[in-house]
Amino acid sequence: MNTPVDMLVEEHNVIERMLVILNKASDRLEGGEQVPAEFFLNAVDFIRHFADKCHHAKEEDVLFKLMGRRGVPTEGGPIGQMLTEHSYARQYTSRLEIAAKHYEQGNQAAKEDIIENARAYAQLLSSHIFKENNILYPMAGQVFSDQDHEYLLQEFERVESEISGEGQHEKYHHLVEEMEAHLGMVTAEHSHHHHHHPHLV
C-alpha cells in the first residue's frame, strides 16, 4: 500500500464490507428476524464519517480537483458521474437514518424503508466503487507525476487529521468487525489475522 490511490482502494475494501453487512441485515429484517434499529444507525454513522467525510472528501476535495488541473474534465464525464453518485449516496443515507429512527420509535412500517434504502445504497456504492477502481483511478494513474503522488499523500494525511482525527480508521474498522460478528459473518481469515497480530484487535 504505497500510492495514494492504493489508500483509496483500501478504503473501498472496508466500505464494501459494510455493503455486504447492509444487504445481510436487510435480508434478515425482510425474513422477519429482529435487527435492532441501532445496527442501522451504526451503519449510518460509518457511512457519514468513514465513507463520506473521510473517503469521499479525499476524492472530491483532493483527487478530482488535481485530475481537473491535469486536464481531466470535472464537469460531466466520469468525474461528474462520480460526484452525482456521491450525492445520491448521501440521499439514501439520510433516508436510511430517518427510517431507522422511526423504527427505533416502534414504527414497524419503517422496516420497509430501511430495507429499500439500505439496499439502494449498497447497490449504488457497489457499482460506484467498481467504476472508480477500474476506470477513474487508472485514469488518475496516467495523468499524475511522482510529485502529484507526493502532494496527494500529504493532502490525504491532512484530510484525515482535519476531518476524522487520529484513531478514526481503527474505530470504523472495528465497528465493521463488530457488525460482521453480530451477523455471524466472522470468517476464518479474520480470526486468523487477529491471532497473529494481537495489536490489531
Image: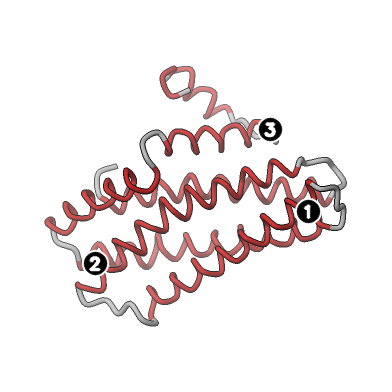
First in residue order: circle 3 vs circle 2: 2
Nearest to viewer (mark 1 / mark 2): 1
Mark 3 and mark 1 in contact (Cβ < 8 Å)?
Answer: no
Q: Secondary structure at mark 3?
A: helix
| Gap between marks 1 and 2 measured at Cα | 41 Å
Q: Secondary structure at mark 2?
A: helix
Q: Nearer the viewer, residue 124 or 96?
A: 96
Instruction: Pinpoint residue 53: horizontal percent, then vertical percent.
Output: 44, 53
Residue for point 14% across, 61% down = 145
Where residue 102 is drawn, which disc sits there? 1
Residue for point 70% across, 41% down = 38
Q: Give the amino acid at mark 3.
A: His
- 122 sits to left or right of 103: left
- 88 sits to left or right of 115: left
| Gap between marks 1 and 3 measured at Cα | 22 Å
Q: Which residue is mark 3?
A: 182
From the viewer's perspective, is residue 136 above or below residue 157? Answer: below
